Image (cartoon, rainbow, N blue to C red):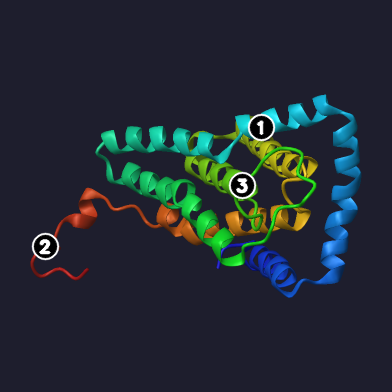
Amino acid sequence: MQAGAVPAAAVFLLALAGVLGRWEWMENADWAVLDPLYRYGVAHPGWVTAWDVLCTVFHPAVFRLIALIWIVYLLMGRRPDRYRVALFLAATVEFSALIVVFAKAVVSRPRPVTALVPEFSSSFPSGHALGTAVAVTAMLFAASPWLRGRWRSAAIAIGVLIVVAVGVGRVVLNVHHPSDVLAGWALGYLWVLVCLPILTSRRVTVVDEKPAAPGTAP
């Protein structure tokens, strides 16, 4: 099992149980964060606009478009190793949209009534948090052969900053409970780990595909 899978699953299941069970302590914790952010947002419209723009610029749909372009480029290369990367990006970044739709339909948690910008789907989990977590993590894994030293550290730092900023932004805008965002991050990271063997499995080479010579053992 990939490192981090158990903690990610535990966080998601805890948040899911809290939502379905309507745990009072979790609802109180959510509103302890949302209430002051709502009051500040009402008094500072520019603050709300800035966070709304940030969440729009780094919307999961933007990452899915980037991933789609990357996938098409990889498929044009006609190389088995590139096909695997393309499949990994499709299974993670593109398929994550369906995971969000399914999870929201099943849980059907209402949005906070204090939402500062209009949103129309249900609340749990945060699609922005899940989508950006999946996209950034998957793209970092896919690009890892080309990222070395300081470039790798810089890419990871920027990726983490984007994921955290978008998740925080959804709470600042009061369109998600903090538990929605935590669940989105956890489920998104978990899904990438589930799909990671697609990327890390042993590469198939021309030698692998040739039959063994007569009289030789494999």
The residue wearing badge 1 is: 154
Q: Secondary structure at mark 3?
A: loop
Q: Given the image, on which type of amino acid does mark 3 rest?
A: Phe
The number of numbered badges drawn on the structure is 3
The residue where tag 3 is placed is: 120
Please, is residue 53 above or below residue 111 in the view? above
Which residue is painted at 60% across and 55% down in the image? 189
Residue placed most toward the observer, 169 or 9: 169
Single out the mark in the foreground, 1 or 3.
Answer: 3
Crowd rating for badge 3 (residues with CA inside 10 Å; few <14, some 14–19, many 20+): few
Position of 80 with respect to 27 (left or right) is left
Instruction: Please identify the quadrant where the N terminus is shown.
Output: bottom right
Write down the residue under mark 2: 213
In space, the residues marked 1 and 3 are separated at their CA atoms by 36 Å
N-terminal of the pair, mark 2 or mark 3, is 3
Q: Looking at the rendered structure, which numbered label has been put on residue 76?
A: none
